[in-house]
Image (cartoon, helix red, strand yellow):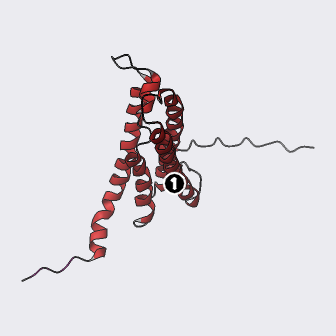
Amino acid sequence: MTSPEPSGARVAAALQPLRVLFVLALLAYPALYLLFRFFAWIVPDAGSSTLASRSVGAGFTDLFLMALPLVAVLIATLTGPVLPGARLFSLIALAEYAFALFFGVLAYLIGLGMLEYIGVFDYLVLTLARLGLITLAGFTVLRIFIALGGKLTVPAALRTPEAPQAPQAPQA
């Protein structure tokens, strides 16, 4: 006796509970990576490396890792019903892209001082291309964030209750 072929709906229903876990993992890993890359870039190692030499390989523009926040936002918004935290997830992804772009551009400019030691053409062109792709991914996430309402609302349970207004005396 053969077992029936699983339908796409059954497989999708089985994967729905994992969506939030995947989104959180795909947002957390790049955030941790960027944090560790930032400290490795700022703090000199035991060797006598300069900030310019550390800037050349700073790693803020790693394309594989910078694709993960976009994938997380797409999973949160397009692979089923929009997850309740989709706006927050897209805001976290935007923050990761802003961090990567800011420090990627800064490391790129500081790394220009080391151009005599590395391939000039590929450093100039490929780093700019990576920054452009990260900008495009960030712009895509921004468009999704705006489509989701464009603002982050605080849940009612976390809002501070407003004090009741004191009755005003009628003016004569």
Q: Is residue 164 above or below residue 117?
A: below
Residue at which label 1 appears: 141
Quadrant the N terminus occupies: bottom left
Question: For this rendering, which residue is in front, 52 or 39?
Answer: 52
Kind of residue at disc 1: Val
Residue 147 in the image: state x and y as whole percent: 57, 61
Give the residues in magenta. 2-6
Q: Is residue 4 above or below residue 16?
A: below
Q: Is residue 170 visible?
A: yes
Task: Report the side of 2 relative to 90 (left or right).
Answer: left
Q: Residue at the location (43% across, 59% down)?
A: 74
Q: Is residue 148 above or below residue 94?
A: below
Quadrant the C terminus occupies: top right
Q: Residue at the location (38% across, 32% down)?
A: 36
Residue 108 in the image: state x and y as whole percent: 51, 34
Q: Is residue 6 above or below residue 116?
A: below
Task: Report the side of 146 relative to 84 (left or right).
Answer: right
Residue 83 in the image: state x and y as whole percent: 43, 59
Question: For this rendering, which residue is in front, 106 or 85?
Answer: 106
Mark 1 crowdedness (10 Å alpha carbons): few <14, some 14-19, many ≥20:
many
The residue sitting at the left extreme is 1
Residue 54 in the image: state x and y as whole percent: 42, 27
Q: Residue at the location (59% across, 54% down)?
A: 150
The residue sitting at the bottom extreme is 1
Q: Is residue 70 magenta?
A: no
Which SS class for mark 1?
helix
Question: For this rendering, which residue is in front, 136 or 160?
Answer: 136
Residue 61 occupies quadrant: top left
Q: Main secondary structure of the magenta part?
A: loop
Q: Is residue 155 visible?
A: no
Question: For this rendering, which residue is in front, 111 or 43?
Answer: 111
